Image (cartoon, rainbow, N blue to C red):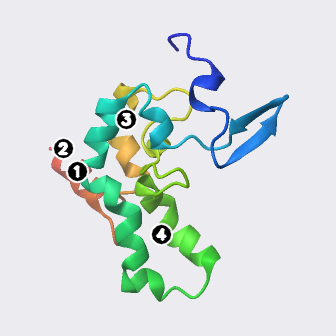
Amino acid sequence: MNNVTCDKCHVEGDKDSISHNGFQITKTPSSKDCARCHPDQVSQFGAGKHSLGWTKMIVAARYKAIPNDKMKASMCEGCHSIGKVNDDGGVGKCDSCHTRHVFSKVEAKQPEACETCHMGLDHEQIEYYKNQNMG
């Protein structure tokens, strides 16, 4: 892992810091934390549609009509959190596509990484992709 230690991502002093083994570290690194080492990638993400996932979700009538927070979380927020606006102002959740603590570029480009969100009755892109590539 290129000698990347915990403190490179779980930095001290973020708004969501917790006490861990005698250190104050961020509980959930955001894209702003990732941008310290990967500014180009975070900038590219910010220029794409996925960065709008959270913002577009919270203003959508369908989302607003869901009666309780648990249903919103299970029905919408898991996938749309890819564009979540974090407490530190960073937009995005890199581990939506990159497995946490690995962050493999190769893995994130596999259709299975997309399948996590782009499947089912209202987001059937993976079904289209698989049918297109079966022949």
| 4 and 3 marks in contact (CB < 8 Å) | no
Residue assigned mark 2: 133
Residue 50 percent across, percent down from the top left: 32, 54
| 1 and 2 marks in contact (CB < 8 Å) | yes
Residue 55 vertical placement versus 64 (above, below)? above
Tell which circle, 2 or 4, labels the residue nearer the N-terminal end: 4
| 2 and 3 marks in contact (CB < 8 Å) | no
Q: Residue at x 43, y 74 (%)?
A: 58
Tell which circle, 4 or 1, labels the residue nearer the N-terminal end: 4
Q: How many marks?
A: 4
Residue assigned mark 4: 76
Identify residue type, mark 3.
Ala
Residue 77 percent across, percent down from the top left: 50, 65
Q: Residue at x 43, y 53 (%)?
A: 82
Tell which circle, 4 or 3, labels the residue nearer the N-terminal end: 4
Hey, which residue is sitting farthest front in the picture? 13
- Residue 108 tag number: 3
- Residue 129 tag number: 1
Residue placed most toward the observer, 107 or 92: 92
Residue 38 vertical placement versus 1 (above, below)? below
Residue 16 placement, left or right of 21: left
Q: Residues within 10 Å of mark 2 (few under 14, many from 20)?
A: few
